[in-house]
Image (cartoon, rainbow, N blue to C red):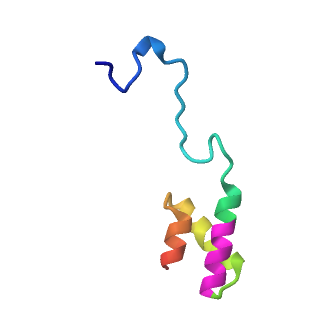
Amino acid sequence: MRSFLPKRNEIKWLFFDVGSTLVDESRVYEERMKKTAQIAKVPYEYVYETAIAFYRENKKGDLETSIT
């Protein structure tokens, strides 16, 4: 019975996507922050600056901003 995983000599490429490496996700984050601002009835710039402050602390800025 063959395993689900390929044999070692059959692997030709191995990709690790560590966020925005293969695909630019900046537009998605921008839209998410705009929606957060709209729902919270605060300026987009406030949400953006708050998210950036969390990112600088190596935290998930978009998620942390939405719960503050």
**Which residues fall within the magenta stretch?**
31-40
The front one of 64 and 49 is 64
Q: Residue furthest left?
A: 1
Q: Quadrant of residue 36?
A: bottom right
Quadrant of the frame with the N terminus: top left
Horizontal side, residue 7 vs residue 46: left or right: left
Tell me if residue 2 comes above or below residue 42 in the rendering: above
Horizontal side, residue 34 vs residue 13: left or right: right
Residue at 62% from the left image edge and 47% from the top image edge = 20
Tell me if residue 64 comes above or below residue 23 in the rendering: below
Q: Residue furthest top?
A: 9
Q: Is residue 22 magenta?
A: no
Q: Is residue 48 visible?
A: no
Q: Residue furthest bottom?
A: 41
Residue at 52% from the left image edge and 35% from the top image edge = 16
The image shows residue 22 at horizontal and vertical percentages of 64, 40
Horizontal side, residue 51 vs residue 26: left or right: left
Residue at 66% from the left image edge and 78% from the top image edge = 46
The front one of 61 and 34 is 34
Horizontal side, residue 8 vs residue 35: left or right: left
**Numbered disc total:** 0
Main secondary structure of the magenta stretch:
helix
Q: Is residue 32 magenta?
A: yes
Q: Quadrant of residue 33?
A: bottom right
The image shows residue 55 at horizontal and vertical percentages of 56, 61
Residue at 55% from the left image edge and 40% from the top image edge = 17
The image shows residue 52 at horizontal and vertical percentages of 61, 65
Q: Is residue 30 visible?
A: yes
